[in-house]
Amino acid sequence: MMKNLILVGPPGAGKGTLAERLIDEKGFMHISTGQILREALANKTQIGLEAKAYMDKGELVPDEVVTGIVMEKLSEDEVRTKGFMLDGFPRTLNQAELLDEGLKKYGIEIEVVIYLEADQDTIIKRLSGRRACRECGRNFNIYTMKPQKEGVCDHCHGELFQRDDDKEETVRNRLKVYSDSTAPLVDFYKEKGSLKTFNGNNDLNVIYSEIKNVL
Ligand code: ADP
Ligand code: ZN
């Protein structure tokens, strides 16, 4: 089985939701920089406070900050033994190169890069309907993945809320940042031969089973 994966794709393509499912089933360690940053923010740590201004605007948090977070995770034995799924990282070519250096240090490699393509309409719908759990961070969608009880997390009964950066204005900026800074990663990993492309406009159940076949 494939061990170390990257999920790349525009915001709203379904990365977070797919990662949650694959992790439940496969026992990978999930490394979501967005989620780690949101937790840091909620706990008012130094990193969280530093990241806030960028996140509120839909801008990227500086490369050194997010790369530091990921390297700390990779330093954990459990993460390297079980294998990991990077979700939302790398997001720039510089981050991808820093990641390569870090992986070399441990003698490990990324085996597959899962690229979720999605068009603008899908993205807007997924993001405007997205609700996240305040307690466990899981994602729901008021259009496509309703919780059993409105406003309440199925898993831990935490409160569901709309992220500040899912408001329309910020979403538009995140899409621009994606096409300027992150989209070039697709070619970078294509050249390395590790890229597998999936149609993120499909139903998430369909994408999920396609991805499982590849793993
Ligand atoms: P999504 O994939 O839905 O856009 P994330 O939860 O991955 O959202 O990220 C939310 C925010 O956290 C981003 O808009 C950005 O400000 C910050 N962030 C997360 N990961 C990175 C990263 N690898 N590099 C820079 N900023 C990041
Ligand atoms: Zn929850």
Image: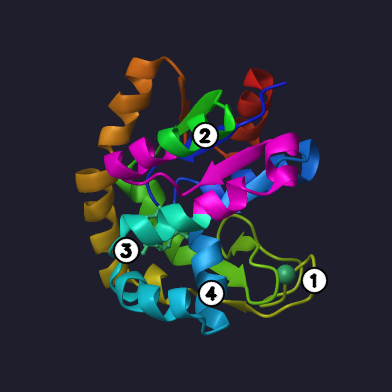
Q: Is residue 171 visible?
A: yes
* Figure label count: 4
* CA–CA distance in space, label 3 to label 4: 21 Å
Q: Residue furthest bottom?
A: 44
The local secondary structure at tag 1 comes to loop
Q: Amino acid at mark 3?
A: Val
| Residue 94 horizontal side relative to residue 141, left or right | left
Q: In terms of depth relative to the viewer, which is nearer, 122 or 12?
A: 12
- Other-residue count near label 3 (Cα within 10 Å), few / some / many at <14 / 14–19 / ≥20: many
- Other-residue count near label 2 (Cα within 10 Å), few / some / many at <14 / 14–19 / ≥20: few
Please give the label number shown on residue 180.
none
- CB of mark 3 within 8 Å of CB of mark 4? no
Q: Residue furthest front?
A: 105
Q: Which residues are magenta?
A: 70-99
The local secondary structure at tag 2 comes to helix
* CA–CA distance in space, label 3 to label 2: 36 Å
Please give the label number shown on residue 40.
4
Q: In terms of depth relative to the viewer, which is nearer, 3 or 164?
A: 3
- CB of mark 4 within 8 Å of CB of mark 2? no
Foreground: disc 1 or disc 4: 4
Q: In terms of depth relative to the viewer, which is nearer, 148 or 137?
A: 137
N-terminal-most mark, 1 or 4: 4
For the point 42% across and 35% down, the residue is 101
Is 209 magenta? The answer is no
| Residue 184 horizontal side relative to residue 128, left or right | left
Please give the label number shown on residue 105.
2
- CB of mark 2 within 8 Å of CB of mark 1? no
Please give the label number shown on residue 156.
1
Disc 4 residue lies near ligand 1 with CB under 8 A: no
N-terminal-most mark, 3 or 1: 1
Which residue lies under the disc numbered 3? 171
